[in-house]
Amino acid sequence: MKPPPFRYAVPTTVAEAVGLLVEHADAEPRVLAGGQSLVPLMNFRLAQPGHLIDLRRVPELDGIRLDGDTLVIGAMTRQSAVEDSPEVALVAPLLAEAVGFVAHRPIRNSGTIGGSIAHADPAAELPAVALALDAEIVAVGPDGTRSIPAAEFFRGPFSTALAPDELLTEVRLPHWRGGHAFVEFARTHGSFAIVAVAALVEMADGRVARASIAMTGVAPVPIRAAAAERALEGAVPDAAAAADAAVEGLAPAGDVHAGSASRVQLARVHVRRAIERAVSRAQDRR
């Protein structure tokens, strides 16, 4: 298993990386972050970029900081750094919990936050977290910087709103102050999720003031369970009823890991579990 021939560049600034994407547009360039997804695809010749742009020496893409009430994570920040970050644990504990489900620690030492989100695998955990948290995905291209809501970012399996000459530079996550939960069903720990659910709940006077629920593994992209959110908000939490609402109308594709009906049932069970855990944590934080 060897990739086809390609040219290789190691920029040191975002501007230089974007310039290389523009300069080598005819060669179908790809950017290399952690390499955990792209390198295997290249070895199997499922991806055949003529020019590879390695981002590991662009320091401005790395780091975690607070911007007021918003958590800002550089695209090249390693998943293990996010897992260990006190800022992430404080502002976005849902992300900290979800990262622990991504493969195994050696993989997370190389894998990056931006790489996982830009790869847009429909079974990946981090896109669902970005969707649940209403993240803003910041991209830089030859025309400047733009911010893309997570709800508009994922277009299909392995397809995003990024233009070919744009670079994902950071992910911005607002602070949720209620309870959270990330639950998933996988064949083995560290495997891709067959179904996963990210849930956020804010409580007030025994009722749900706000809810956000995202699912992965049940559609070509991560999706929000809007019907479940509506069933919860303003009411005493009924996790079972919300879970039924979440899966109504779902018709996921089946595969060797789980058929369509099995995925729907797994989604129902895990939405209920995620809501129950998020509500419990929200109540504990009062």
Image (cartoon, rainbow, N blue to C red):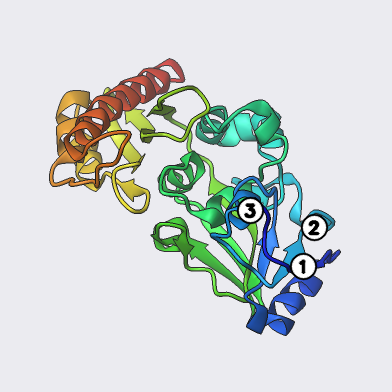
Q: Could you tell me which secondary element the residue under label 1 belongs to?
A: helix
Q: Amino acid at mark 3?
A: Asn
| In the image, residue 75 above or below residue 152 | above
Residue underneath mark 2: 60
Q: Earlier in the sequence, mark 2 or mark 3?
A: 3
171 or 104, nearer to the observer = 104
- The crowd level at tag 3 (other Cα within 10 Å; few <14, some 14-19, many 20+) is some
Picture layout, residue 13 above or below residue 99? below
Q: Are marks 1 and 2 in contact (CB under 8 Å)?
A: yes
Q: Earlier in the sequence, mark 3 or mark 1?
A: 1
> In the image, what residue type sits under mark 1?
Val
Instruction: Give the labeled residue for mark 1.
Output: 14
Residue drawn at the location 43% of the way across and 29% of the way down: 180
Q: Quadrant of the C terminus?
A: top left
Relative image position of residue 61 (x, y in whole percent): 75, 56
Q: Residues within 10 Å of mark 1 (few under 14, many from 20)?
A: some
Q: Is residue 255 left or right of residue 109?
A: left
Query: In the picture shown, does residue 153 fall above or below 7?
Result: above
Q: From the viewer's perspective, is 83 left or right of 182?
A: right
Which residue is labeled 3 in the image?
43
**Mark 3, mark 1: which one is toward the viewer?**
3
Residue at 34 percent of width and 41 percent of height: 215
Q: Which mark is residue 22?
A: none
Q: Does the CB distance between marks 2 and 3 fall below 8 Å?
A: no
